[in-house]
Amino acid sequence: MTRKIAPTRGAMRRIKASMSLAKKGRDLLDQKRKILMVELMGHIEEVGKIQEEMKIIFASGYESLQTAHIVMGIRRVESVANSVPIQDNFIVRLHSVMGVEIPQVDPISPDAPPVYSFGSTSPTLDDAYVHARKVLALIARLAEVHTSVTRLAVQIRKTVRRVNALEKVTIPFQKKTIKEISDILDENEREDLVRMKLSKRNQA
C-alpha cells in the first residue's frame, strides 16, 4: 500500500464506507454536470438568437440615423442625442441553479417615449430612437445571458475536475487499498492455518 494504513478488517470496512460515499458523490456531481450542461446549452442558443436580432435592429436603426443626419444635420442630431438621459438604473436579481448564481436583469421597456420634442426632429430620428431602445433592451438581456454562460461554464469545469478526481484517483486508490488489505488478511489467515496445523501435528 502506498499509504500507511493498518491492514485490519476495521480499516477495510472504513475504506469501503468511504469508497461508497465517494461513488455517491461522483454520481451526484455527474448529475449536477448534466443539469448545468442542459442549462448552458439553452443559454448559448439564446445568445445566438439575441445577437442575430441585435444585428438586424442595429442595422435598421443605423440606416435611420444616417438619414436623420442628412435631413437634420449632424450637429442637431448630436444635440438631441445629448438630451437623452443615460440609462443606468438596471435592476439585477440572482437565482441559483445547482449552486450557481445566475443573474436576471429586469426587462427594459423598448417602448419608452422619447424625452425630446417631436416638433424639432424628423421621423427618421424618431425611428432611430425606437431602434436604439430595442437594442438597449437586447444588450441588457445579452449581458444577463452571457454572464450566465460564463458562470455555468466555470462551474461545469470545476464539477468535471471533481468527478475526474473521484473517478480516476480517489476511487481507484480505495479499490487498490481494499484489495491489498484483503490480500494481506488472506495471507495472514493462511499462515495462521498453517501454524495451527503444525501445532496440532507437533502435539500429536
Image (tube, helix red, strand yellow):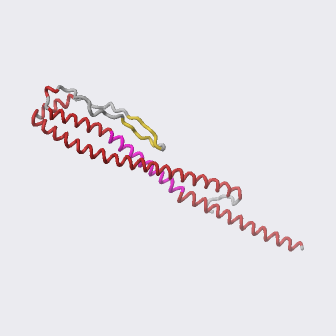
Q: Is residue 32 above or below residue 68?
A: below
Q: Which residues are magenta?
A: 141-166
Would residue 105 be found to the left or right of residue 13 on screen? left
Q: Residue at x 64, y 61 (%)?
A: 178
Which quarter of the image is occupied by the N terminus? bottom right
Q: Is residue 151 magenta?
A: yes
Q: Position of residue 33 (x, y in %)?
A: 47, 51
Q: Residue at x 19, y 41 (%)?
A: 60
Q: Residue at x 48, y 43 (%)?
A: 99
Would residue 39 be found to the left or right of residue 10 on screen? left
Q: Position of residue 190 (x, y in %)?
A: 75, 69
Counting the numbered discs, the total is 0
Q: Main secondary structure of the magenta part?
A: helix
Q: Position of residue 161 (x, y in %)?
A: 48, 54
- Depth check: 82 or 6 in front? 82
Q: Residue at x 57, y 54 (%)?
A: 23
